[in-house]
Image (cartoon, helix red, strand yellow):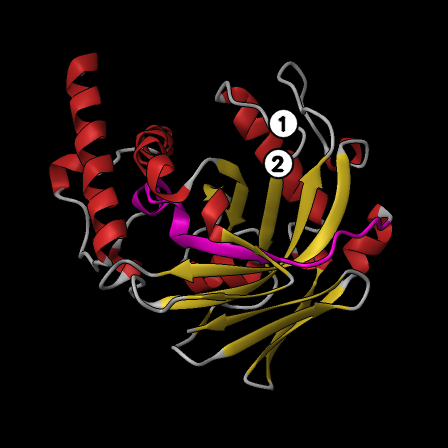
């Protein structure tokens, strides 16, 4: 068995390396072999340490992103299970906003549905999608800004990608909307870049229903001793394959039953 102090040393050094890449705009081939997480459990422990370093830079966490919740993204990334990361206060925008290209390695955008949790989702129960209807305050269209901080992400293990908050670099959220859960599953979203449609999908693409992703995260966080709390915003996964963008590009996401939001990279 590996001594706890040795594990802590590994996790701290891995988090420091990932923080360095984040703040210097990388990219990096991979974590050094001796710092790579050997399991998803280890990856989230490294992520915790990384986020403690990032809070003074980006502000407190305000929610989560979930990746690989749709077939199109699981196929694209070659990962068959959901992956969670934290979203920070200074990295969130609302309705129409801009992010700077400077400081990003390889920026991309994703077309998502987000929800805001209205009540604490405490530990001690196994949440289902049906349960989530009683805990969601509102839903909104979302653009997730991702950043590929790797020279070739296809060669990086899923646990290592999770350690780095699974590509997250920010989010733009649309207007808050009250929408019945059955309509949320039927909601269809379209993404444009510079006025051209680049993809579309529906809420049902997200594990069959967006609340399935939320239930997964609620159970995941409860098991980790850090349950979802009222006010948390969760971007539930992209219904369109990641699109890579450059400075000057404008992105619009529209879910007619939810509204729209836009992002410009400057």
Q: Secondary structure at mark 1?
A: loop
Q: CA distance from mark 2 to mark 1?
A: 6 Å
For the residues bearing labels 2 and 1, Cβ distance under 8 angstroms = yes
Label drawn at residue 17: none
Residue, disc 1: 229
At a point 78% along the width and 30% down the height, the residue shown is: 131
Magenta stretch bounds: 158-179
Answer with the quarter of the image where residue 143 lies: bottom right
Label drawn at residue 232: 2
Side (left or right) of 90 relative to 149: right
Q: Secondary structure at mark 2?
A: loop
Query: In this rendering, does residue 30 appear at all?
Result: yes
Q: Can you say whether 76 is above or below 1 in the image?
A: below
Magenta stretch encompasses residue 43: no
At a point 17% along the width and 14% down the height, the residue shown is: 5
Q: Position of residue 218 (x, y in %)?
A: 61, 30
Magenta stretch encompasses residue 174: yes
Q: Can you say whether 71 is above or below 213 in the image?
A: below
Side (left or right) of 32 relative to 227: left
Q: Position of residue 11 (x, y in %)?
A: 23, 29
Answer with the quarter of the image where residue 1 lies: top left
């Amino acid at each position: 068995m590996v001594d706890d102090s040795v594990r802590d040393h590994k996790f701290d050094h891995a988090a420091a390396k990932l923080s360095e890449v984040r703040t210097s705009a990388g990219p990096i081939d991979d974590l050094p072999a001796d710092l790579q997480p050997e399991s998803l459990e280890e990856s989230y422990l490294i992520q915790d340490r990384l986020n403690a370093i990032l809070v003074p830079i980006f502000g407190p966490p305000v929610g989560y992103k979930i990746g690989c919740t749709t077939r199109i993204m699981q196929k694209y990334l070659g990962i068959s299970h959901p992956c969670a990361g934290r979203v920070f206060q200074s990295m969130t925008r609302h309705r129409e906003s801009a992010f700077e290209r400077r400081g990003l390695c390889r920026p991309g955008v994703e077309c998502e549905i987000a929800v805001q949790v209205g009540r604490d989702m405490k530990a001690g129960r196994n949440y289902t999608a049906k349960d989530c209807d009683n805990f969601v305050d509102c839903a909104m269209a979302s653009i997730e800004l991702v950043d590929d901080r790797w020279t070739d992400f296809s060669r990086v293990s899923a646990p290592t990608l999770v350690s780095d908050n699974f590509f997250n670099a920010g989010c733009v959220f649309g207007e808050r909307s009250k929408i019945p859960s059955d309509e949320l599953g039927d909601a269809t979203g379209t993404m444009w870049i510079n006025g051209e449609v680049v993809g579309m999908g529906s809420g049902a693409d997200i594990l069959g229903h967006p609340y399935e992703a939320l239930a997964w995260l609620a159970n995941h966080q409860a098991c980790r001793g850090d349950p979802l709390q009222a006010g948390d915003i969760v971007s539930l996964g992209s219904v369109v394959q990641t699109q890579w963008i450059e400075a000057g590009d404008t992105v619009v996401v529209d879910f007619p039953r939810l509204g729209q939001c836009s992002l410009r990279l400057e």
